[in-house]
Amino acid sequence: MRLGATIGSAADIDGSYAWLRMAISVLVGTVGGVGMWAIVVVMPAVQAEFGIDRADASLPYTATMLGFALGNVLVGWAVDRIGYWLPALGTAVLLGAGFILAAFTTSVLQFSLVHGLLIGVGTASSFGPLIADLSHWFNKRRGLAVSGAATGSYLAGVLWPALLPGVMTAHGWRFAYAAIGVACIVCMVPLILTLRRQPPHAALAGGPGTRPLRPISLSPSRLQALLVLSGLGCCVAMSMPQVHIVAYCMDLGYGVARGADMLSVMMAAGIVSRIGSGFIADRIGGVKTLLIGAVLQCLSLFLYVPFNGLASLYVVSLVFGLSQGGIVPCYAVIVREYMPAKEAGRRVGVVIMATILGMAIGGWMSGWIYDLTGSYAAAFLNGIGWNFLTISVAAFLLWTGRRAQLARA
């Protein structure tokens, strides 16, 4: 049973309401996405206050990503059964409460638990379940819509890292966290309440007018497993610059503000990449778009190794953002191209869970490698190695899909 005020009509698919819903989804993602980015900015301050090393300081981020991963699966499962707005409403309150509670923690263990159980889970409804639900409202422009909605998390990466350093300088990271918690509840609750309309039944049942599933010589479970491996690999690689760029800049003597600026540049470029990948996916398909993004991300990671000057780091961060931003939304596009619409919430949730686990593992692993070696050079090379896993999976899926298409012809 799907709970909601009204059920949409077939005319709403690709219509004005669908685009309005996408715009609201971007706002939800922008506010809710703070759960992924706040810890990146406050990591040096938390490390200094609690007197811990870089690996331990990375644990709250890892906990956040683990909670976020679990939340994407649980909320995605709930969305398939009762619709989007009610699970999203509950997790929005959870997110706000988590930030407020985190402001009063007294140890890194408490801080990590709050990040994992409240902030991580609370952030989940603003990404995977959100774009899975939105995919039901689009047919012709599904790739663009999904990628567009996913820009909310990157807009959050532009907005929040730019705002937090000033607030932290004036009032401390604890005040900043409490203020974020209040902002999440005040902004997200009314936005989510505008999303109570449910997708048309035909969109969920694969009725007339919807896109037919693409052929592939893999069972849904095997395809799901390969997408999980791909998502894990790409995001272990992606996590090194995204999670540690602020700390990296501090080590190089450039300061927190410069690192936060580079993170904002990276995320702003990622927005362009996500929108561009949506246009491309609507024309050549999700698998080809994934392969292009994975290759470009690998090349951009190589650039971090030789270039560590201030100006060059800004340029490399821009290139990295333009390269990797469209990768994760491609998984939602691929799921909708090859799997039934009624399973979209949980299928997308599982793949997004893998990408988040990749960010969690990669974020901690990079800190651990730094503690072992005293620099981030080896951590960048580690990310490059993981990136080849994604390239291999995408190439295999492309080959398998072509083989199935030829067999059907």
Image: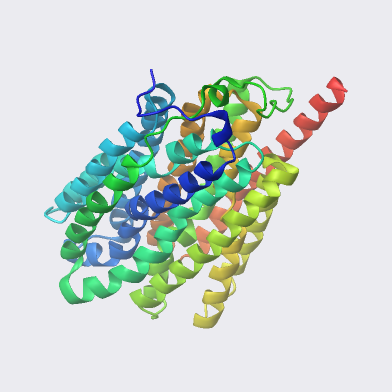
* Residue 211 drawn at (x, y percent): 68, 29
| Location of residue 267 with respect to 306 vertically, above or below | above
Relative depth, front residue between 39 and 349: 349
The residue located at (28%, 60%) in the rendering is 53
Drawn side of residue 302 relative to residue 65, left or right: right
How many numbered badges does the structure rendering display?
0
Q: Nearer the viewer, residue 335 or 302?
A: 335
Position of residue 2 relative to residue 265, above or below, is above
Picture coordinates of residue 55, whole percent (x, y): 33, 55
Q: Determine whether 63 is above or below 8 in the image.
A: below
Measuring 60% from the left and 63% from the top, which residue is drawn there?
A: 322
- Left or right for 172, reference 150: left
Which of the image's four quarters has the N terminus?
top left
Residue 127: x and y in percent read 43, 44
Residue at horizontal 55%, vertical 65%? Answer: 269
- In the displayed structure image, the side of residue 310 where residue 168 appears, left or right: left
Q: Is residue 171 visible?
A: yes
The residue at 59%/32% (across/down) is: 335
Colour mode of the rendering: rainbow
Quadrant, the C terminus: top right
